[in-house]
Structures are given as structure tokens and as C-alpha cells.
Image (cartoon, helix red, strand yellow):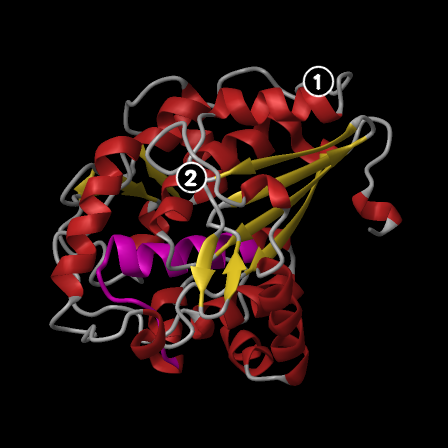
Amino acid sequence: MTSSEQGGAGVVTVIEFTDPGCVWSWSSEPTLRWLRHRYGDRLRWRRVLGVQIDALERTHPGADPVASAEDFRARWLEVAAHTGAPITERLEWIHHSTRPAAQAARAAEQQGPAVAEAVLRRLREAVFVAGRPADTTDRIAEALAGVPGLDLDRLLADRAGGAVARSLAVDWDETRRPRPEVHGLTGPGPHPGAATRHGNRLRYSFPTLILRGPAGDRVVPGWRPPATHRAAIEAVAPDLAFVDERPLDGGVALERYRSLSARDLELLSGSPEAPPRAVRVETATTALWIHPDEASDRRPLAAEGAPG
């Protein structure tokens, strides 16, 4: 463990194990946004991209990228029944591999945290909202068109470079050394986050957070409510307080995050009311609202959208 991961007074390090194509990670985004808003820079965040599907034929033998798509979407709808996540009305194909999207997410980190968050969000919306997974260079470029502050040409070049490949290799191995606490874990909830089998190794389920602070560390695996995350933070850093306890105005939230689900609004703003000028995108489960300045770049996502 490095000194930066041990935590210090008033600081908690968060290690997030995740994947751009994981529906439970997509469902957990509102809670993680809430944590970042409430605690601000008192959380030091490190994302580990574990690559859920390295090659579809190996992780899901017999699955066809197109023919099996509806089977995958049906399972996502079951997840959304618990989480309220937006889910596409039509999935055109399954990720051939989530590694290309993970490479893009890691490359985006070289352009700063705001760009990195926006890129990962877009990669998830490509599959779970637009139904067009970003699993090739062209599809990644399509999904990321118009991300504010993003140098897309640089990202595509960095994504193919050796630094990103080496970084993801480290993430791959770290993900497949899960802590004993998550071996054989059961309950509570529909996704308790037990370590799952990947080939001949176990890996962390996505998402899993490891929180490290002055009073020790805690593992928060799987799908958990915000209260569980807050309790874990209080356990590892008893003196850590919210940076901001006030609800975030919906319009301000839209400017900051560029897209918002109903669950985002509920946690951040305390109200499901749509922000002014937001473009509404319908899904099979719930609406998503996107910033009007991005709507023209986001086809087919915003094709059926309308303001407010």
C-alpha cells in the first residue's frame, strides 16, 4: 500500500473496481456522484478498470453479439427494476469486448478528471441508453463526439499506446486478487458483490469500492444504497464531514454533469423535476435528461428527445 492510499487526516482514498459495460456500475453512478458532491476533495479517487468482457466468446460461450442481445437486455431490465437505471429500448449488439471502452476511459484520464468522468459516462450511455456499445475505434469516436473539453484525436492516439496497455494490465491483475471479505459473500440485496469467477481466477464484482482512511479500511461491494457508503466512510474517517450538504439545483447539476437520470436528480437535487432546457430522452425504464448544447452531437441518443 502506498502512502497516498493509506489516507490521512480528513482524507479517504476510494479505490473503485468497475467496467464501462457493467449494468450494476451504470446503476451505481448516481450514488457515486452523490458521494463526490457531498465530500468533494476529501475523497481521493482511483478507478480500476477490470474489463468485464475481454472476449465475448470466452466470457459467454455460445453468445452471439446480435442474436443474444435481447437476452442481455432482459437481464438489464431485471437490474433496473431494483435500481431505477435507464435501459435502452433496443440493444443492437453486445460488446464484443469491453476492453476498447476501458482503454478509452483510461486514456481520458490523461486529460483531467472532468474529461475522464464525462467520457466514462458517455461510454456507458452508448450501451445502456443508445443501445450501441462502443467496442471499436469508430464506435468510440461516435459515442464521444462533442464531450466538452475532450481532445478526441489525442484520446484515440493515447488509447492505442503502450502506457494505456500497461496500465490496464495492472488493473486486470489487481481486479483478480479480491480480498477475502468478498469471497463467497451473500446478501443483502440483489447484488451483494461476491467475488465472481473469470476464467481460472476470481475477480471483484463490479462495482466494488475499497475505502481507506485514518481509522482503517472497509470494502463496499456490489449494489448498495448511499447510506451504506456514508457509514463506511464514517467508519474509516470518523471526523470526515460533508463539504456541502445543500441540495444541488437541477440546472446547476445539468451544467456540471451534462446528463442526469431520475435517480441522479433524486440524490443530488432532492427532486425528480427536470432541469430547465434539458432534452428528455426516453428509455424502456425511465427518462434521461441531457444538456441542450450536446443534443445535436448525440445521435441516435437524442433523436427522439424534446426539451424539458
**Image position of 259 (left or right of 16):** left
Task: Tell which of 284 and 222 is nearer to you.
Answer: 222
Give the vertical position of 79 relative to 63 (above or below). Answer: above
Question: Which amino acid lies under the numbered mark 2 shown in the image of this protein?
Answer: Ser
Q: Which mark is residue 7?
A: none
Q: Nearer the viewer, residue 84 or 243?
A: 84
Mark 1 residue type? Ala
Are there few (<14), some (14-19), or many (20+) residues within 10 Å of tag 1? some
Q: Which residues are magenta?
A: 116-136
List x then y, in percent, for residue 155.
Answer: 55, 74
Quarter-of-image position of residue 97: bottom left
Tell whether position 134 is magenta.
Answer: yes
Q: Nearer the viewer, residue 34 or 3?
A: 3
Residue holding disc 1? 241
Q: Position of residue 214 (x, y in %)?
A: 83, 29
The residue that disc 2 covers is 28
Q: Earlier in the sequence, mark 2 or mark 1?
A: 2
